[in-house]
């Protein structure tokens, strides 16, 4: 779609569209019309149209939600491994899971020259989308999908489904899940969808009380497990949205003298180190975070070099790693 076609859909002039994407003055009515059309079509101007200078800075902005996160560290390591070879430097911003700081960081990179941005996505608000659609450089999103942008994501639904089915096939009859906010479409909604799908295929009725919502911490996983086991019908297998949450659930079970895997089986997602060192070690789905970072960097470089405005979505698969929490064995020393 070119700018003339988009302007027609938005009901404004070409010059109004140009002013919008270059921060020129526009009435609020026209801004609203353009933003509604962007939401409807996913339109973003081609890089050639938005980038009037071919000057290369060899700088790439990388926005991460949490500096201490192992998954973020692995993604960033993958990005760096690729960009370093091409002589690029990373400008790393940690937003501490603050959506406002994510938007501020995007604005920072939009107004200060970089060759591209890699965003480790969490929850996208309307404000995120408005700023993203004004970016003058390519943006690659990691961990989420967003219409109109190139994305590297994981098969979160498939991983959650496979782990749930594993526990059901091993005798689990009362599955439960400790999930995260459903505003997070990948770690939240997609993993709950996988859990529900496994129950449906196994003929087990899903109830709202089958799911407890946690944040991404050990303490929150501990309290969510406590709530699950305070109910009259106690679970005999639990899928946790992350390994960190699963480690918190395992801690509660140890303190409550609930034996894993005899009384309850337990799974996490992500193949984090904490799951390997927990007692018992936690069955998980290995998501390829470093590969995601490498693929994001390669996709960004290809876009920068070839002025390619075609949006692509790459979904990375998972590996099931069975450990002691579902009757497997510890794999200390096996995985990198």
Image (spheres, helix red, strand yellow):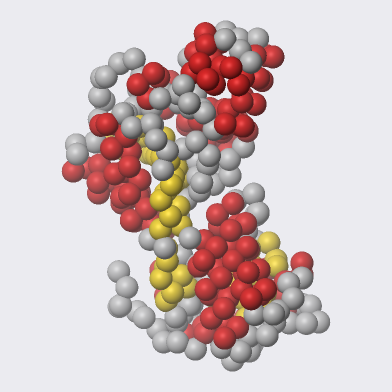
Is any part of residue 128 visible from this angle?
A: yes
Residue beneath the point at 34% across and 27% down: 114
Residue beneath the point at 73% across and 72% down: 206
Q: Position of residue 251 (x, y in %)?
A: 58, 76
Query: Is 182 placed left or right of 321 in the picture?
Result: right
Is any part of residue 252 visible from this angle?
A: no
In-front residue for pair 265/189: 189
Q: Is residue 153 above or below residue 306?
A: below
Picture quadrant where residue 128 is located: top right
Residue beneath the point at 50% across and 67% down: 159
Q: Quadrant of the C terminus?
A: bottom left
Counting every numbered tag in the picture gives: 0
Query: Is 126 placed left or right of 43 in the picture?
Result: right
| Residue at the outermost bottom position | 262
Q: Position of residue 34 (x, y in %)?
A: 61, 20
Q: Position of residue 200 (x, y in %)?
A: 67, 73
In-front residue for pair 242/273: 242
In-front residue for pair 168/15: 15
Q: Position of residue 78 (x, y in %)?
A: 31, 51
Q: Is residue 16 above or below residue 145?
A: above
Residue beneath the point at 58% across and 17% down: 8
Q: Is residue 91 above or below residue 172?
A: above
Q: Is residue 63 above or below residue 25?
A: below
In-front residue for pair 15/103: 15
Query: Is 270 placed left or right of 173 in the picture?
Result: left
């Amino acid at each position: 779609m070119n700018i003339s076609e988009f302007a027609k859909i938005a009901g404004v002039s070409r010059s109004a569209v140009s002013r919008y994407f270059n921060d020129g003055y526009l009435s609020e009515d026209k801004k609203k019309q353009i933003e509604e059309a962007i939401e409807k079509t996913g339109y973003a101007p081609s890089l050639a149209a938005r980038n009037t200078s071919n000057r290369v800075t060899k700088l790439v902005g990388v926005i991460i939600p949490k500096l201490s996160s192992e998954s973020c560290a692995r993604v960033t390591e993958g990005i760096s491994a690729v960009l370093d070879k091409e002589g690029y430097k990373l400008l790393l911003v940690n937003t501490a899971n603050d959506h406002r700081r994510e938007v501020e960081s995007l604005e920072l990179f939009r107004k200060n020259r970089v060759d591209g941005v890699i965003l480790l996505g969490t929850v996208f608000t309307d404000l995120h989308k408005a700023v993203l659609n004004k970016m003058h450089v390519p943006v690659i999103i990691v961990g989420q999908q967003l219409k109109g942008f190139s994305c590297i994501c994981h098969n979160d639904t498939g991983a959650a489904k496979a782990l749930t089915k594993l526990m059901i096939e091993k005798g689990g009859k009362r599955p439960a899940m400790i999930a995260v906010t459903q505003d997070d479409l990948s770690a939240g909604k997609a993993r709950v969808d996988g859990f529900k799908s496994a129950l449906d295929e196994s003929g087990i009725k899903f109830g709202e009380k089958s799911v407890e919502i946690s944040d991404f911490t050990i303490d929150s996983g501990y309290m969510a497990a406590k709530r699950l086991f305070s109910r009259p019908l106690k679970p005999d297998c639990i899928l946790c949205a992350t390994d960190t949450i699963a480690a918190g659930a395992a801690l509660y079970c140890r303190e409550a003298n609930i034996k894993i895997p005899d009384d309850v089986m337990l799974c996490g997602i992500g193949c984090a180190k904490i799951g390997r060192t927990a007692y018992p070690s936690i069955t998980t789905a290995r998501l390829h975070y470093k590969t995601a970072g490498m693929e994001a960097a390669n996709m960004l470089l290809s876009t920068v070099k070839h002025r390619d405005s075609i949006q692509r979505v790459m979904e990375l698969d998972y590996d099931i790693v069975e450990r002691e929490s579902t009757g497997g064995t510890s794999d200390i020393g096996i995985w990198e």
